[in-house]
Image (cartoon, rainbow, N blue to C red):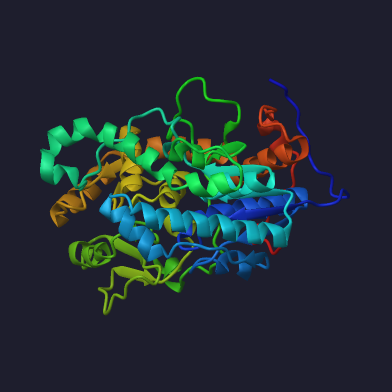
Amino acid sequence: MTVRIARLPRSAPRKTIAIFCDGGFLAHVTRCFEVGRALKECFGHRVVFCCDGPYAHIPRDLGFEVVPVFTVDRNVTMRIAHSLLPPSMSWWKSVNARSVASDLEVMDSVRPDMVVGDLHWSLSTSARARGIPYVSITNACWTDKFAYAVDLPEEHISTKFLGRRLAEKVFPLYTRAMVKYGAKGYYEVRKQHGLPPVQTMWEAVEGDITLLCDLPEFMPVVRGVPLSYRYCGPLLWEANIEPPEWLSRLDPNRPTIYFTMGSTGNTRFFEEAVRVFGNTQYQVLITTGGLAEIRNPPPNVFIAKYAPGEALMAVSDVVVSHGGNGTIYQALACGVPIIGLPAIFDQEINMRRVTSLGAGLQLSSKDYDGRLLEQAVRMILRDSGYRERCKTLAARIARMDGRRRAALHINDFLELRDPLTHPTTATEVLRTLPPVPRFAVA
């Protein structure tokens, strides 16, 4: 393995990097946003965000160029995710063809030296069709390198016909069939561009290099993973939002619970937060994300549409969430245990890893009972081990410095164009890079 670190001097001509993400989902936009900030601040690159949807304003509001690109409506994506069934092949082929065509149109307009994509599957075709270096950002569980088998989701349709026990045995076969089914949707469009077919959707996730925005102990991979796969660490969003006025009025001696459901969780749990914990000894903090409205809350319930999650978690004893990747890593980075009520299957994967590391508890959304939620909160507050284990993980996240480590890997690959040349001394080099301002303007 070749070891070399290349850093672009400030006086050198900057490169253009196009970052593709799904503007319909907060976590995908925000982690790309943090990488883009670091690429600009640490290496001086021009960063163009290619996305469309309700969260595309985040990079635009901070002065970055934002170019719209074809994106499946988030409600359609969520329906497919909740159904746990594949879409029709005719629809899937048409979506892939439109996505590749839109990618190519944007590339021809922006003329990037490199593209970066966060689960933007069509880049595995469009970037290679244009011969542009491609860096993929994803989580280990979205690759075939993940060290653990993916368990049967709680409400998978197969349980209705086969029962839970038999469905669990069949599910690995179902999973393998689905990743092959998804790959078939790219056959025609790749053939049009003279590219060989992908055999599975795992191949569509891979870039020339693939950055895993995880802690290795949280989302481990199997032995013998290619050098093109690198852990960069969690990509934590620092929101440019003023804290709510009630934050300074909280009583530090009262137990505090923070409820957040991201952009994909079940908002009925906001109502449950009020029902179960209203008018009790707890302080209840809720950020709705504009997805729900809570009228006339009790005096111990504090509500904001948006708020800086880090500030709220810093004063909280436990976080209750949907188990989304961004929320989990933000809570762990603050050393706060998590109670998860997953809404879709990848959130179940996240919460199973949380529970296996003793950093929180998973509850069933299907068989939810308010008494169980209250018991879970009491259990975490009584057992200091949850907090201690989260603090250990928080120290690891801080040392990884995800946003700058990701930018370092991207810049290194941009300079060398060799996916097997690995900046193995990345931790040392991070100390020499300029910091990323808390609220940077492009």
Residue 232 in sight from this viewpoint: no
Residue 17 sits above or below residue 350 on the image: below
Foreground pick, 39 / 434: 39
Q: Position of residue 212 (x, y in %)?
A: 53, 38
Foreground pick, 107 / 224: 107
Horizontal side, residue 2 vs residue 155: left or right:
right
Place residue 355 in its image quadrant.
top left
Q: Position of residue 433 (x, y in %)?
A: 74, 43
Place residue 102 in its image quadrant.
bottom right
> What quarter of the picture does the N terminus occupy?
top right
> What quarter of the picture does the C terminus occupy?
bottom right
Residue 379 in sight from this viewpoint: yes
Residue 411 sits above or below residue 109 on the image: above
The residue at 38%/39% (across/down) is 179
Horizontal side, residue 309 vs residue 281: left or right:
right
The residue at 70%/59% (across/down) is 108
Q: Position of residue 147 (x, y in %)?
A: 40, 27
Foreground pick, 36 / 247: 36
Residue 408 sits above or below residue 341 on the image: above
The residue at 53%/63% (across/down) is 70
Residue at the limit of the structure toward the right, as seen here = 11
The residue at 38%/51% (across/down) is 324
| Tally of numbered tags | 0
Horizontal side, residue 208 vs residue 141: left or right:
right
